[in-house]
Image (tube, rainbow, N blue to C red):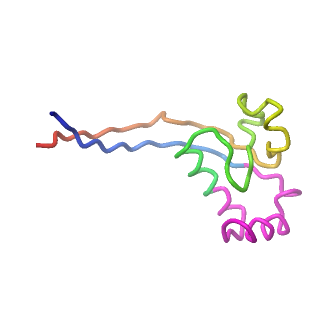
Amino acid sequence: MEAYKCEVERTDRYEIEFDENVCNEQWMEDFRSVFYDFYDLEEHARHIAQFRARFGSREIEGYGVPLENGQVPYWARGESYEGRVNYAINIKILSEDDDIYIDTDLIE
């Protein structure tokens, strides 16, 4: 059997936008009481961006379904997602999978 060790590096770029009228200090305090100890929007943005890069477009625990490029994602437009779309958070996709590098080594 032939096997390869593969190392993959990729670069995704996002802008994470928050409606500060909704994502305010009270919202962060409520979030901290259940989820992570994030104290500013930058920490939330970092978490949302890494989640998106790792898992793709899906519901994010604690945030619901963020908008994508200002729109409800096509897969979240049904009745089963009613109330789970978070209109206060938008992931602006600048690039995904555009810059990718793969290094392979034969395992002997």
**In this view of the protein, which residue sits in the foreground, 87 or 81?**
81
Q: Return the x and y of residue 102 as percentages of the image width and height.
A: 32, 38
**In this view of the protein, which residue sits in the foreground, 14 or 23?**
23
- Does 21 sit above or below residue 101? below
Is residue 2 shown left or right of residue 45? left
The picture quadrant where one finds residue 62 is bottom right
- Does 90 sit above or below residue 23? above
**In this view of the protein, which residue sits in the foreground, 88 or 33?**
33
Q: Residue at x 71, y 30 (%)?
A: 75
Span highlighted in magenta in the image: 17-45
Q: Residue at x 69, y 49 (%)?
A: 16
- 98 falls in the magenta region: no
- Does 12 sit above or below residue 32? above
Q: Residue at x 16, y 39 (%)?
A: 106
Residue situated furthest right in the rendering: 21
The picture quadrant where one finds residue 41 is bottom right
Residue situated furthest front in the rendering: 80
- 34 falls in the magenta region: yes
Q: How many marks?
A: 0
Q: Residue at x 62, y 44 (%)?
A: 14
**In this view of the protein, which residue sits in the foreground, 42 or 27?**
27
For the N terminus, the quadrant is top left
Q: Return the x and y of residue 21 as percentages of the image width and height.
A: 89, 57
Is residue 99 shown left or right of residue 31? left
For the C terminus, the quadrant is top left
Q: Return the x and y of residue 23 as percentages of the image width and height.
A: 82, 59
Residue situated furthest left in the rendering: 108
